[in-house]
Amino acid sequence: MFWSGCRRPSRAAELRRGNNPGTFESGGIACCVIHGLAGMGKTQTALEYTYRYESRYDAIFWIRSETQAELSACYAAVACKLGLQESNSPAAADSDRNIEVARDWLGRTRKRWLLVFDNVEQIDDVLRFIPASHAATHGAIIITAQAPDIQPVASIFQRIELTSPDVADSVRIRFNCLEREARDPEEASEAVEIASIVGGLPLAMATIGGCMCVANTTISEVLKTT
């Protein structure tokens, strides 16, 4: 489940500057790596970008990348989505062929596309899935990962590090999940206390806020359990 309050719109806007398809008139692939510790909102930042700028692309593909099996299955499914699938067989050879077909299409089409490789462990895991960059290519890649040392994989390359937001942003995430503002100064102060307890981690704040909505509890009740 993705709690919407965990999104970080300002960083999504930063992504746009590097992955704006308007910069692709000369062709090529742009890539941005979003990195940071677990719970910083890397996936949510990428998700926010796809929501906000969907109209800028002809096709967006979300590739789960925690394991090679997930990577292969999701990427092979791209061929199916594009109507290029050569076989419905789950056999490894057929999956590899569909991966090749999808990668070739992405490398040569003039359509504007976005690939999101989410939760990459090692950059070597995704290298075989990155299309070759041709003059006609108009694509963008987003990689989310904890590792900060991922090497450039495209001619246009940037890194965005996500760190813990300040207290004000952490509190905002909490009340975004509740879809309201603080009722009074006391509740606002309690939200600041919770932000301090969890180190301001966006995912932790969003998860607590979401659980409060489901359980219909108050911030005071949450503090009593911590």
Image: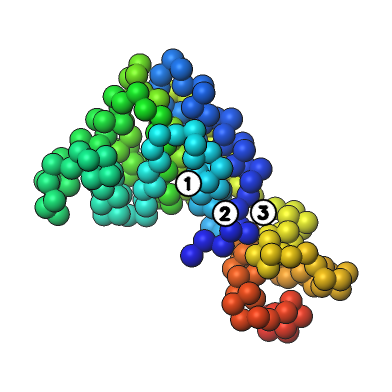
Q: Which residue is depicted at the point 54% across and 53% down?
A: 44
Mark drawn on residue 71: none
Pointer 1 or 3: first along the chain? 1
Image quadrant of residue 11? Answer: top right
Name which residue type carries label 1.
Thr
For disc 2, the marked residue is 41
In x, y percent, where is residue 138?
40, 25
Separation of residues labelled 1 and 3 (CA atoms): 16 Å
Is residue 172 shown left or right of residue 214? right
Taking the spot 18% from the left edge, 42% from the top edge, the residue there is 85
Q: Are marks 2 and 1 in contact (CB under 8 Å)?
A: no
Say left or right for 48 vs 217. Answer: left
Task: Give coordinates of residue 194: x percent, y percent.
Answer: 73, 70
Q: Can you see residue 220?
A: yes
CA–CA distance in space, label 3 to label 2: 9 Å
Viewer-closest of 21 and 65: 21
Q: Nearer the viewer, residue 147 or 96?
A: 96
Report which residue position mark 1 lands on: 144
Q: Amino acid at mark 3?
A: Ser
Q: Residues within 10 Å of mark 2 (few under 14, many from 20)?
A: many
Place of residue 21 in the rendered image (x, y in percent of width and height, measured from the top left): 49, 27
Q: Which residue is mark 3?
A: 164
Q: Residue at x 52, y 61 (%)?
A: 2
First in sequence: mark 2 vs mark 1: 2
